[in-house]
Amino acid sequence: MAKILDKQRYKCAMSAMQTVQAIDRAIPVLHSGPGCAQKLSSSSGSSGYFSPNIYPCTSINEKDVVFGGVKKLESTIRHSLEVIDADLYVVLTGCIPEIVGDNTEEVVEGFRDARKPVIYASTAGFKGNNYKGHEQVIDSIIDQLLEPSDIRVKGLVNIWADVPYQNEFWHGNFRALEDLIKRLGLVPNIIFGYNRGLSSVKKIPAAEFNLLISPWVGLGNMKKMEQKLKIPFLHYPTLPIGAFETSKFLRTVGEYAGVPKEKVEAIIEEQEAYYYYYIERYADLFLETRVMSKQFTVVSDAHYALGITKFLVNDLGLFPAKQFVVDDTPREYREAISSYFKDLNYGIEASVSFETDGFKIHNEIKSHDYHGYPLILGGYWEKEVAKQTNGHFLNVSWPVNERLIMNSFYVGYDGGLKLIEDIYSVAKTRFN
Amino acid sequence: MSYKIAIASSDQANIDLNFGSAAEFLIYEVSDDGAFGFLERRTVFETALEGSVSACPDKGECKGGGCHGSGPANPRVDSIADCRCVLSKKTGTPILKQLDKKAISSFEVEGDIEEALHKITMYFHRVDHHQTLRGIANVR
């Protein structure tokens, strides 16, 4: 039978309006049918100065299909500039105008001399999901807003990691990454989140290098910046969670940036002492929580599946069952990502499946012997299969329901402790 | 199957009237192969228009809940009930709702009738034959 309905793990490319919204005082201007912003209504933490319900939209209809919607687009952009006080206007195109052939580029070109920058990104839903849409928006910023810089600010590093709102810990994670980079004596530059905005975007070309912490999302952007802005990049595929990965992360970045080795080691020693102080305090918890799972499965995008798998094996000593990557990873990246999952301590290798079919994923989970209660970290959809398999469930990836994430994070030493807290808070609900 | 298109025009050459100010509609017939030809002029009877000066039938009962096109049937809408769509300079919201209920689509467009008909018939032809709409906005 044809596959018609499935558990939603991501949204269409046009949801990159969230990427725009994560840039302070930037606003998406939608060239789409009415209701395209509605898909964000279930997202958490998206109100504020601009919220999805007020995004200007051309609200194109049948008439614009037949006669073209460029006039409406022109007037919508013009009026947005007049009535909305924003720093950056990002026109996002939906499926309809891209199919019928509206020349958005030409219309946006007409606003080159507007008092505020207007750029556009092609985010038709048929081009891919919001991970791709996120990349499209960053590409547009590079192509249309940034110029190569003669100045290189010593130690300035652009940090790229979580996809805002899709990864619900994005805000806290960026702050934690910022903090780690600061400790190395470098100057972090992040465009998303509190108190950043267009001024941070403008700093991008002056950076010494780009730091990408993500298995695949953003790689294209890094290559584009390397080519256009002559900024080299360091690709660190694993989101550093907990002591093992974070120390490795600091060493890798430190070496790349030319930070003296003694300095890096001193930071790591200090941080690990602090981290293991807590691990030691709670050793009894780790030893005596007999109901705690032995094997785990992560159902998430590649970013979190990889970061969490490494943490749970390398730091917590759990054994990986099969891991599921549900972000529809482009084929060209899959082999490399699979190999990252094989690079675990104690010679352990995790097998990973790139699968978006929730039914198949749940069947595989149900048929696996976890040698105890399964530990399942995933989207809200996995709550059901965790219940059926009598497992421990933690909601870490989109969709996130029944839990609120504001500024908490899983990155770094503190982030690792936070993830331990969250996992054991679930395990401890069971009679030991 | 052939279908009809209604047009609000004062000079039989251009779409230049608002839906509500049209005293007559030009009816075009479109055949299976997409060819179109003028069929007739359809007058909206003056008597039928009495008492419907405003297109909005609201007597205060909609209470700001949005317009649902309730109220008495509009004689202009009735007069083109057999058409697939209507082309006019502008159509008010209450009328749009009434047209919706009769599955008549409304296109707000100005200018040359022939040109507009050419595009619309091509659009319907492609939709009816499950053909792609790719690039249709740029077809001259």
Image (cartoon, coloured by chain):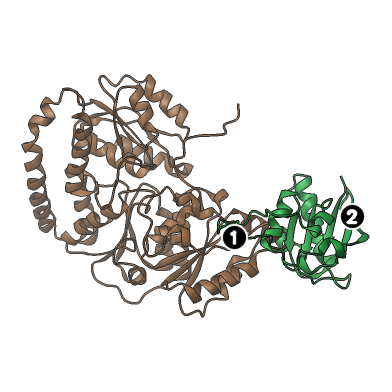
Chain colours: A brown, B green
The location of residue A27, given as percent across then percent down, is 44, 65
The location of residue B80, given as percent across then percent down, is 83, 55
Pointer 2 with pointer 1, Cβ within 8 A: no
The location of residue B65, given as percent across then percent down, is 56, 56
Q: Residue at x 40, y 34 (%)?
A: A381
Determine the chain carrying the residue at label 2.
B
Residue denoted by label 1: A59
Residue denoted by label 2: B29
Please tell me whether mark 1 sits on a helix, a strand or a loop: loop
Q: Tell me if residue B114 can be seen.
A: yes
Q: Residue at x 67, y 57 (%)?
A: A100
Query: What amino acid is found at the position of numbered circle 2 in the picture?
Result: Glu
The location of residue A408, given as percent across then percent down, is 24, 49
Determine the chain carrying the residue at label 1.
A
Front in this rendered view, residue B57 or B89: B57
Please rate how many residues cluster around mark 2, counting C-alpha atoms within 10 Å: few if below 14, some from 14 to 19, many from 20. some
